[in-house]
Structure formats: structure tokens, C-alpha cells
Amino acid sequence: MPDEAMDAEIGQNLHLVIEGLRAEGVTYAAAVDEFRWGWMLAELNHTQGNQCAAARGMGVHRNTIYRGVRQAEIQINVKRPGRRRSHLARMLAFRKEENNAKT
């Protein structure tokens, strides 16, 4: 689809969404907030919770994502393959194993 045709289709779809929101009495501020949170959650989902990558994808500073996650109280549990545990984490895990072996 050429860019102009895609832009026209997006514009038509956006117009329908706006008219639907207006008909339901949604305020401009509420609609903007909902759009921003929806976009942020979609980016976080796309980046598998990587907040820096989500910020790059949205074209915003990473602190914008961090604040949004904190404000929305979103839990992000990301396990990145290949990442090593820190020395402190390895030491704590070793001590926990020692204590479990003693009991």
C-alpha cells in the first residue's frame, strides 16, 4: 500500500475512533492519556519488558517509560537469556544453598 493511501486509511480510522470517543463523552485529556498508556504498554510488550528499547521505539527518553511504569504500577519481570548473576547474587544463592543443606 503506498504511503499516501496508508496515511488516508489511518486518518479515516482515527476519525472513527475520535467520533466514537466523543459520542461516549470521553474528554480530550482522558483520550490522550489512554492513547499514551496503550502505546507504552504495546511497546513494552513488543520489547518483552525492555524499558530502554521501548523508549527508543517510542522516541522518548527512557525516564518517561520508567515514570509511566511506576505510575501505573506495572510489574515487569524480565528474564534475559545469557545474563550472568552479579557476584552478590551468586554469593547470596550460595549461602542460601549452604543453609538449606545444614537443615
Image (cartoon, rainbow, N blue to C red):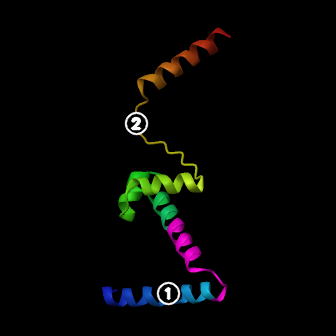
Q: Which residues are magenta?
A: 23-38
Structural distance between the alpha carbons of marks 1 and 2: 42 Å
Location of residue 23 (image quadrant): bottom right
How many residues crowd around disc 2 within 10 Å: few (fewer than 14), some, or many (20 or more)? few
Residue at which label 2 appears: 83
Rendering coords of residue 98 (x, y %): 57, 12
Residue 16 horizontal side relative to residue 53, left or right: right
Q: Residue 44, position in %: x, y?
A: 48, 57
Residue 2 seen by the camera: no
Q: Is residue 42 magenta?
A: no
Determine if the magenta segment contains residue 30: yes
Q: Residues within 10 Å of mark 1 (few under 14, many from 20)?
A: few
Query: Is 83 left, or right, of 42 in this rendering?
Result: left
Q: Secondary structure at mark 2?
A: loop
Q: Where residue 87 sits in the image (x, y, percent)? A: 42, 23
Disc 1, SS: helix
Whether residue 66 is visible to the viewer of this picture, yes or no, is yes
